[in-house]
Image (spheres, rainbow, N blue to C red):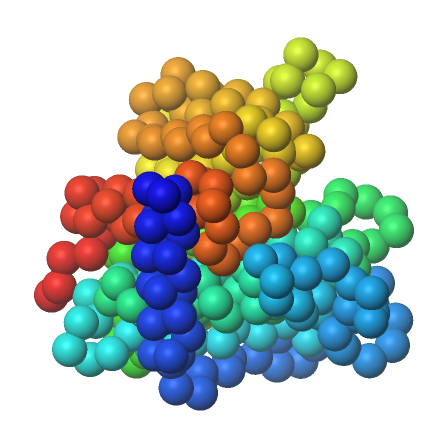
Amino acid sequence: MAGMKHFLALALALCSWNLCAAATPQVITLWPQGAPGALAAAGEERDTSGPNAGKVSGKPVIRLGNVSRPTLSLYRADKDKNTGACVMVCPGGGYNILAWDLEGTEVCQWLNSIGVNAALLKYRVPKAPTGEKHAAALQDAQRALGVLRHRAAELGLDAGRIGILGFSAGGHLSAVACNQYEQRSYPALDEADKVPCRPDFALLIYPAYLSVKEKADALPPELPVNAKTPPTFLAMTQDDGVRAECALFYYLALKQAKVPSELHLYPTGGHGYGLRASANMVSHWPARAGEWMRASGLLTKP
C-alpha cells in the first residue's frame, strides 16, 4: 500500500509538470554557418521510433535521429519562481539518437517547476563511423555552454549558475564537458568561444561509458577528473545494464579529487526511465536532485 501511495504521488507530480509545460521555447542555432567537421547524419531529421518501438511507463518515446543542425531550446521558468539558474539538458541515445521527450522536454518541464531555466541541447547524432564517439557532440556542448554564458544577461540567466544534466550517453557527454573545457575542440568562431565553457555543476543520471570494464573500471582518457571538475550529483540503479560501476568509479574519482559530490544508488529500475513514474524507488531521483541543488545554493533567487 505504501508503495502504491508513492507511485500515485509521483504520477500526480508528473502530471502537474506536464500540465504546466513551458511556453514555446526560444530556439538558438549553434552554428550559423554549419557545424564543423564531417556529418554522419544521413537523411532528414525525424523520429526514428517504429510502430513496435518500446515504451517507458506506458508512453512512447521520441527517438530523434539524423541530427545535423545542432540547436539549444531555452525553456524559461515562470517569472514568479525563476531563480536565474540554468541547466543544459543532454538527452541520451547511445550517440545514435536522442531520447527527445523522455530525457529532454519532460526534464525541462521539471526543471522549470523548481525555478530553473532549462536549455535542451540537440547535438549531432549519429556518431561518426570513425574517431571518438563523442567528438561532434562535445563540440556542440562546448559551443552551447559558451553561448549560454556569453548571452546570459540577454537571456536573463545567471552566468555563474549554468549547469549540465545528462542521461546515459548524454551523461557521458556531460561528464566529458565537465573535464574538457580549457580548450575548445574546434576553431573559435566569435566572442561566445572566448568565455569559459566549464559547467558550474553537473547532474549525471544513469550515465554510460564512465568506466572501462576491461581495465579494472578505470576512467576512460576523456575523463581526467581533478579538483576543478564541477560538483556532481549522480543517480543509478544496481540492475542497470550499463553497469552501476560507471557511476561508482566516477564518484570515487570525484571523491579522491575532493570534488563535492553526491551518489544515489538504487536497487532496481534498470536503464532509460527518465523521470517517468514507476513503482521503483529510483523514481524519486528528481526530488533528491532538487534537494542537492537547493542545499548547494544553486536555487537561491536573486
Q: Residue at x 21, y 43 (%)?
A: 296
Q: Residue 8 location in percent, x, y? A: 37, 57
Q: Is the N terminus in the top left, top right, bottom left or bottom right quadrant?
A: top left
Residue 227 seen in the figure: yes
Q: In screen coordinates, is 282 left or right of 67?
A: left
- Please tell me whether residue 194 is drawn above or below residue 69 in the rendered image: above
Number of numbered discs on residues: 0
The answer, for residue 139, to whether it is visible in the render is no
Does residue 69 sit above or below 207 in this rendering? below
Q: Position of residue 198 (x, y in %)?
A: 42, 49
Give the quadrant of the C terminus. bottom left
The residue under the point 39% across, 86% down is 23
Residue 264 horizontal/vertical position (percent): 40, 32
Q: Give the residue displayed 56% in from the left and 51% down from the top.
A: 273
Q: Position of residue 261 (x, y in %)?
A: 34, 31
At horizontal 61% and vertical 62% (from top left) the residue drawn is: 58
297 left or right of 184 in image: left
Find the residue positioned furthest to the front: 1
- Would residue 277 appear left or right of 12 to someone viewing this image? right
Q: Nearer the viewer, residue 267 or 99?
A: 267
Residue, far left? 302
Relative to residue 70, is residue 103 depicted above or below? above
Q: Residue furthest top?
A: 216
Foreground: 177 or 237? 237
**Residue 38 as seen in the image, left or right of residue 4:** right
